[in-house]
Image: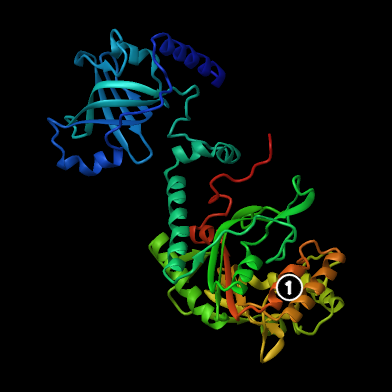
Amino acid sequence: MASTQELKEVRLGKLNTIKKAGINPYPVKTERTHNIVEIINKYGRLSFAKKEVTIVGRIMSMRGQGALAFIDLDDGTGRFQVFFKKDNNIKYDGVKIENTFSFFKDVVDESDFIQVTGKLFKTKKGQKTIEVTKWKIVSKSLVPIPNEFYGLKDEDEKYRKRYLDILLNKEVKEMIQKKSIFWNTIRSFLLERDYVEVQTPVLESVTGGADARPFVTHHNALDMKVYLRISAGELWQKELMVAGLPKTFEIGRIFRNEGMSNEHLQDYTQVEFYEAYSDYDKGMALVKDLYRKVAKETFGTTKFNISDTEVDLAGEWEIYDFVAILKERFSVDATNVEVEELKKVLTENKVRFDKNINKEKAVDALWKSIRGEFTGPGFLINIPVFLEPLAKKNPNNEKTVQRFQIILGGSEMGKGFSELNDPVDQLERFQHQDQMRKGGDEEAQMNNNDFVEALEYGMPPAFGFGISERLFSVLSGKSIRETTIFPMMRKK
């Protein structure tokens, strides 16, 4: 079997033959009259004997011998058969070529893009076909695509050459199309409710809106260290509420310099939206409607198998009390506990932890050790105030905050809360986070004095919510890596 380099050399020779014939193998324009899906959909209404059409596409397969050639073209919208016959006096479009059929056989390969003009007909077997009267090459390929039957078997190769995986794997292409529906449904849902779409900075001098380790870079023009944002503009959007915009949202990329897993990536798309004069109780009802709408529009159902459990978004949503669950399972009051006691409980329950773990991380580790038992759909509420620096305290228990997290199949799939708008309280919580950073917690939030100053001018009570593309991957039943179009790969 010839090597890829040997096959490339043969195709380079054919490319040279095309050029010597006075043909540009990579022309600027095509004369397409229909895309393939239009031909398929309108086929019954077209006059087969009279209608001449021009289509363009990649050659996916070539069959036949001697004076006949059957070719399958794919233009990304569909696939269609075209038929070359030597006796038909086929012409090359734009250039006079002697024996055009032979020239076609000599220089064209599978993977090439060609344009064909001809009349529609059906073969004796009933196959819808175009009988070619004129053709031209529009892009000469130098390396053959893998055989469709065998495709790409190596997982690493699939991600490195994702363009081939998409071309050969219908399921991957459909996933990309569904992902577009997913995000556009979220966008439409919010726009229909009078939210204003905004774009906030990706480069920040101070990160905010999440507990995460940021990527660090240097801004040459200002000669300063900056960070890639770790949230979709949470603090910026709240400043817009100070500015008098009551409803905003952003769909954008965020970046977190953390580990990779089936559920986590370093850069991904997230939506965050904020509504003045709302709260987390109203937010729960809104989010339920959003999730049901997105599921129905994207997947055609509200029922999903998540972690081997059927979850129905259209059914009742549970309420899970964070503090009550930990007290029942571990006899720990998460609102009033010290780190040494937590270490003892973690050890007794065989939960691994770093010896320098702080209280915040220890409580979180306890919860995560049992999180998988809660399948949802549901809302996890009553989070200790020290775990959330941006949410309002519960009026009936100021040791917890008005925050909820969506629970689906044992994972957290979105977070919302009544936004903290008290500048004094906000400053104190930022200072606590700053102490955690100084103690070695690289994921603790930074002290943002500019944001506190904005709050001092007054921000209305508000609800905010954020969800990443991980929701799409979970509802798809795939890892987030599989549902990323071009995942990050280590260099070879």
Q: Which residue is nearer to you in this view: 71 or 276?
A: 276
Residue 314 in picture, x, y percent from top left: 43, 74
Residue 414 in picture, x, y percent from top left: 58, 68
Q: Is residue 40 left or right of residue 154?
A: left
Q: Is residue 277 above or below residue 301?
A: below
Q: Which residue is nearer to you in this view: 36 or 94?
A: 94
Q: How many marks?
A: 1
Residue 216 in picture, x, y percent from top left: 76, 51
Q: Residue at x 33, y 21 (%)?
A: 136
- Which residue type does callout 1 highlight? Glu
Q: Is residue 355 visible?
A: no
**Figure quadrant of the C terminus:** top right
Q: Is residue 100 above or below residue 296?
A: above
- Give the residue at mark 1: 453
Q: Which residue is nearer to you in this view: 457 or 47?
A: 457
Q: Residue at x 79, y 48 (%)?
A: 223
Q: Is residue 343 visible?
A: yes
Q: Is residue 379 above or below residue 58?
A: below
Q: Residue at x 84, y 76 (%)?
A: 339
Q: Residue at x 72, y 65 (%)?
A: 211
